[in-house]
Image (cartoon, rainbow, N blue to C red):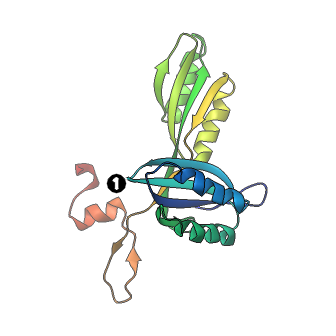
Amino acid sequence: MADIQANGLERRTVVALVEDKPGVLARIASLFRRRGLNIASLAVGASEQKDLSRMTFVVEGDPTSVGHIAKHLDKLIEVVEVADISDSNVVWRELAMVRVRASQESRPRVIQLANIFRVSIVDVGAEAVTMEITGDTSKIDSMITLMGEFGVEQVMRTGRVAMLRSALSQGGVDGEIQQLTTTNILAREGLESGSV
């Protein structure tokens, strides 16, 4: 999931599983700073394992530099595992909350646009509505741009969270890993997609 930016740098996705202790984030961020790499976004949260957190960094840099920093991160005591998953088959999302001006006259149009983007309206005030949107960066950017005609009062974004897609081994002669879509899994189990 590497995107080329206007400045010619790639945005690469690095995921780390770390011990949930004070100061870990500061140590990791200082390592990026010392290497001269910009963290474009960062998302941190509890993982499926007790006392471990998962971090998703979106870093601006070339594959070699980001690969080097992943190796250095792996040497930190608090880091359990780390990987640059940019070139892997991943699923990722961002979350944004956007507050938009919405008078009685403009509110129907704001809600109509919100429906087109499949966003949830999470708060309604006398002169504004707050929406929650998940998706890729371009979807969120497009929605914010369109809402600009009404007046965007505030935007809060999480940054990217990402994980590798599920892969199941087929056990064939060549030992390839086959990505199974929901349709393939349902077909294999003898189910129709409409019955789930």
Q: Quadrant of the N terminus?
A: bottom right
Q: Using the rendered view, name the quadrant where residue 187 is placed.
A: bottom left
Q: Is residue 37 visible?
A: no
> Does dot 1 land on a helix, a strand or a loop?
loop
Crowd tier of the residue under label 1, counting other residues whose Cα lies within 10 Å: few below 14, some 14–19, many 20 or above? few
What type is the residue that disc 1 sits on? Glu
Q: Nearer the viewer, residue 148 or 95?
A: 95
Q: Residue furthest left?
A: 190
Outermost residue to the right:
7
Residue shown at 42% from the left, 63% from the top: 165
Q: How many marks?
A: 1
As displayed, is residue 158 above or below residue 108?
A: below
Height in image: 41 above or below 165? above
Q: Nearer the viewer, residue 17 or 124?
A: 17
Q: Which residue is mark 1?
A: 48
In the foreground, 44 or 93: 44
Rendering coords of residue 170 (x, y %):
32, 78
Q: Position of residue 25 (x, y in %)?
A: 55, 51
Residue 156's quadrant in the figure?
Answer: top right
> Residue extending furthest bottom?
173
Give the vertical position of 3 relative to 178 (above or below): above
Q: Position of residue 105 (x, y in %)?
A: 60, 11
Residue at the image point whose x is 62% and y is 67% from the top: 69
Q: Is residue 101 visible?
A: yes
Q: Position of residue 49 (x, y in %)?
A: 34, 56
Q: Name which residue lies at 53% across and 65% down.
A: 76
* Residue visible at 40% across and 69% down in the picture: 179
Q: Is residue 127 above or below residue 18?
A: above
Q: Nearer the viewer, residue 10 or 134?
A: 10
